[in-house]
Image: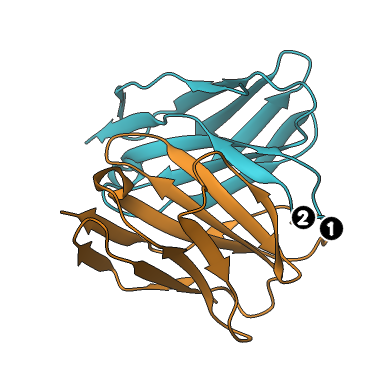
Chain colours: A orange, B cyan
C-alpha cells in the first residue's frame, strides 16, 4: 500500500540554523499538510497546501516557516532560523481529491524528529 | 477556540473485552471525524473515518457519531494486546476541496489491553 515518506527521521540542529524537512506524499494525492507534535502534547496543524499554494496556515506558521513543492513528488517544510521551542515531531500528511466514501482522509508519514540545541 | 476533548485515560481493558473511547467537539459545523491510533514514538495511523450520524463498522472497530450532541466514539471489540496505544480523535475544519481544511486533534486516550 502506498505510504507517505519523510526524511530525515531525526534532525539535530543548533539554534538559529535553517532546516529543511522533506516529504514524499502518496503519488496520486493532491492535498498536502504539515503538522507537529511537541513531546507529550497534542498534534497541531501547521499548514495546508493545494494547487501549488498555501490554502490555510495556523498561528504557529509564522514568517520563519515556508513550504514548497519543488518538483512533482517532494513537499518540503523549511524553518529559517530554528528556536529551542521548534523541537518537536513534524508530520507530513496527504489526501486524495474528493472521492465518495474516502473524501477527507489524511494519511500521515512517519515523521521527522527535530531537536534544536 | 475550537476544541476536541478526550478523556486522557489511561483506560485499561481486559483482552477480549470491548474498549470504548469517547470524544466531544465544540464546532457545530464540523462534518468529518476521524480516529487515529498512535503507538509511542510513531505517527498517527488512520483507523476510522465517519461523516454521517449513526454507526460505521470496520472489522473490530465501530465509530459512532451524534452531531446533535457533538459526540463521536470508537468501540474496539475483542480487544487485543496489539490495540494498546493512544487513540486520537480528530475533527476536520474548513472547506474541503479548497484544500483549506485542517484536522484539530484531541489530546488522545491511552488504552492498555491487559492479557
Q: Position of residue A108 (x, y in %)?
A: 50, 59
- The nearer-to-camera label among 1 and 2 is 2
Graded by Cα atoms within 10 Å as few (under 14), some (14 to 19) or many (20 or more), the crowding at tag 2 reads some
Mark number displayed over residue A100: 1
**Residue B106 appears left or right of A110:** right
As rendered, which of A16 and B39 lies closer to the eye? A16
B109 in relation to A102, above or below: above
Q: Residue at x 55, y 65 (%)?
A: A67
**What chain does mark 2 sit on?**
A
On the image, the x and y values in percent for residue A107 come to: 56, 60
Left or right, A87 with reference to B68: left
Determine whether, in the image, residue A32 is placed left or right of residue A37.
right
- In the picture, the quarter occupied by the C terminus of chain B is top left
Residue A18, how many percent across, how many down? 33, 66
**Number of numbered discs visible in the structure rendering:** 2
**Would residue B78 be visible to someone looking at this image?**
no
Expressed as whole percent of the image width and height from the top left, the position of residue A19 reads: 34, 67
Mark 1 neighbour density, 10 Å: few (under 14) some (14–19) many (20 or more) = few
Residue at position x 32%, y 48% in the image: A86
Can residue A35 be spotted in the picture?
yes
Residue furthest left in the image: A117
Q: Which residue is mark 2?
A: A103
The residue lying at 34 percent from left, 58 percent from top is A81
- Chain where mark 1 sits: A
User: Closest to the observer: B114 or B84?
Assistant: B84
Q: For the residues labelled 1 and 2, say whether their Cβ atoms are less than 8 Å apart.
A: yes
Q: Quadrant of residue A71?
A: bottom right
Amino acid at each position: 500500500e502506498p505510504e507517505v515518506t519523510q526524511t530525515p527521521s531525526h534532525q539535530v540542529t543548533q539554534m538559529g540554523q535553517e532546516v529543511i524537512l522533506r516529504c514524499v506524499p502518496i503519488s496520486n494525492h493532491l492535498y498536502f499538510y504539515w503538522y507537529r507534535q511537541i513531546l507529550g502534547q497534542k498534534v497541531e496543524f501547521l499548514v495546508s497546501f493545494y494547487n501549488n499554494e498555501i490554502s490555510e496556515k495556523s498561528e504557529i506558521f509564522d514568517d520563519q516557516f515556508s513550504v514548497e513543492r519543488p518538483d512533482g513528488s517532494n513537499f518540503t517544510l523549511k524553518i529559517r532560523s530554528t528556536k529551542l521551542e521548534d523541537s518537536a515531531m513534524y508530520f507530513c500528511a496527504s489526501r486524495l481529491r474528493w472521492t465518495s466514501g474516502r473524501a477527507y482522509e489524511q494519511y500521515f508519514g512517519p515523521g521527522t524528529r527535530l531537536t534544536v540545541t | 477556540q475550537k476544541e476536541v476533548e478526550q478523556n486522557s485515560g489511561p483506560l485499561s481493558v481486559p483482552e477480549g473485552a470491548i474498549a470504548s473511547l469517547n470524544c466531544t467537539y465544540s464546532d457545530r459545523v464540523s462534518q468529518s471525524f476521524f480516529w487515529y491510533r498512535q503507538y509511542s514514538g510513531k505517527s498517527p495511523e488512520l483507523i476510522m473515518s465517519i461523516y454521517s450520524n449513526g454507526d460505521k463498522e470496520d472489522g473490530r472497530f465501530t465509530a459512532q457519531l451524534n452531531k446533535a450532541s457533538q459526540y463521536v466514539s470508537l468501540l474496539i471489540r475483542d480487544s487485543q494486546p496489539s490495540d494498546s496505544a493512544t487513540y486520537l480523535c480528530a475533527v476536520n475544519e474548513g472547506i474541503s476541496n479548497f484544500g483549506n481544511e485542517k484536522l484539530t486533534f484531541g489530546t488522545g486516550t491511552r488504552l492498555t489491553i491487559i492479557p
